[in-house]
Image (cartoon, grey):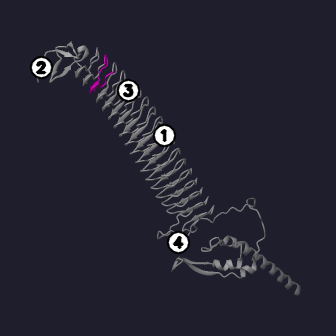
Amino acid sequence: MAIRRPLVVISGGVRELPTEDILLADSLISHGGGGITSNTAAGTEALYSNTTGINNTAAGTSALYSNTTGNNNTADGGSALYNNTTGNGNTADGRNALYSNTTGVGNTAAGAYAMRYNTTGYNNTAAGNQALYSNTTGYNNTAAGAYALYPNTTGNGNTAAGAYALYSNTTGVDNTAAGTHALYYNTTGYSNTATGVTALYNTTTGVGNTAAGNQALFYNTTGGDNTATGRNALRANTTGYNNTATGTHALYSNTTGYNNTAAGTHALYSNTTGTSNTATGLNALYSNTTGYNNTADGGHALYYNTTGYSNTAVGDQALYNTTTGAGNTAVNPLNSTGAYAPIFDPTTENDRFCAGSTGVTNAYIQVAWTVVSDARDKMNFAPVPLGLDFVTQLKPVSFQFKEARNIEVPHGKVRYGFKAQDILALEGPGSVIIDAEDLEKLRYDESSLIPVLVNAIKELTTRLAALEAKCTTQK
């Protein structure tokens, strides 16, 4: 390298340089304006206007050109930190990086045009081509990736990691986007967190949303306080709020529904406007669209429910076939072989309580059931029409249940009871003792037989009294 004299021609004029300034391989290396030894300037007009600023390093044509009293700045690239005057502790790496910064402090920009328009914003970090390009006074922002937080002007406390992350943000604050195009359209929304490619892509002014997974909460615009964890979770949500979806495609179709919780792949998948539903398990409440206040706990629980409401299903496939029924409760419809064998299978029926499967052999409880029987809760009173004649035609039998209707294998212990068909034949139309709602599965209401037995005893008592009176008379 040839050391030249410290008298050089710059921009058509002659400039005297401190004796320490030298030209190395046709590049000017000096201490910049003011000749302060702690500054280093490499490039035409680098640190040109410096007066008393110290500990600055400028590499590139016109880098830190306007700096006067700013300290501890580093500019590497043509016109990097060009307009900085008194700003301290800034680092710009790339052509026109932090170009407009004047008094902003503690900023770091790495990439061509990164933080190009920042003036007084501070403690910002931009890494990537044109990252935080439009930021002016925003502070405490971090952008990593080409065009990340590109139009941000005064928004603060934002973090964007990924190309085009938070691309449209202007004044939104406290947002975090990690993934290409995450929170892409956010403008003024705040306190959102998006992790994954295009997560919260369409959110504009939504607040307090958290999306973790590719395209999670993709279509959300103004909906707030939603949490989506999993690929495509809450994907179609637009204005719905207070929803929580955990699992791939959970609450996938939800648009304006609110206060829903889905945990499991495809849980509440078809829900659109339904509200206050809770689904836990694979495909739980899968078909629900507008139904509300439903709780499904178990894989495929309430699977076919569409508009039914206020149902509770506990156990795998519980209330599987319910569609529009309401107020139903079901617990564990599977038998010991894992087969779906509900004791009752509501579809459109309402207010049914179903416990266990047809495989149950014993049901245990410490005390007898206490049943509500307050006259004030009843109406349409009438005498029971059946009595002694009915009872004398009953045919008690001992029996065992089968493992299944088409399997001639005994299941459980020997029991005493009746054949439902026999009692139904005696009762006729409008049966009460036998529940004939489902002719393929007749059911026996033994409590309804008790009043009939009482009538029979009363009839026998009357007959006995008459016989006793007759015997007394004949004596």
Seen from the viewer's position, the closer of residues 469 and 73 is 73
Q: Of marks 3 and 1, which one's residue comes earlier in the chain?
A: 3
Return the x and y of residue 36 as percentages of the image width and height.
24, 16
Q: Calculate the distance from the C-alpha at mark 1 to the C-alpha at mark 2.
A: 61 Å
Return the x and y of residue 260 as percentages of the image width and height.
53, 50
Q: Of marks 4 and 3, which one's residue comes earlier in the chain?
A: 3
State which quarter of the image contains the N terminus: top left
Return the x and y of residue 452 as percentages of the image width and height.
73, 74
Do residues under tags 3 and 2 come within 8 Å of each other at their CB atoms?
A: no
Q: Amino acid at mark 1?
A: Gly
Mark sitting on residue 208: 1
Q: Of marks 1 and 2, which one's residue comes earlier in the chain?
A: 2
Q: Amino acid at mark 2?
A: Ile
User: Where does the magenta region start and end?
Assistant: 66-83
Seen from the viewer's position, the closer of residues 98 and 26 is 26
Label 1 neighbourhood size at 10 Å, few (<14), some (14-19), many (20+)?
Answer: some
- SS category of the residue bearing label 2: loop
Asked which quadrant contains residue 370, the reply is bottom right
Label 2 neighbourhood size at 10 Å, few (<14), some (14-19), many (20+)?
Answer: few
Do residues under tags 3 and 1 come within 8 Å of each other at their CB atoms?
A: no
State left or right for residue 457 relative to residue 474.
left
Mark sitting on residue 3: 2
Mark sitting on residue 118: 3
The correct choice, above or below, for 59 with respect to 475 in the image is: above
- SS category of the residue bearing label 4: loop
Asked which quadrant contains residue 394, the reply is bottom right
- SS category of the residue bearing label 1: loop
Q: Of marks 3 and 2, which one's residue comes earlier in the chain?
A: 2
Mark sitting on residue 359: 4
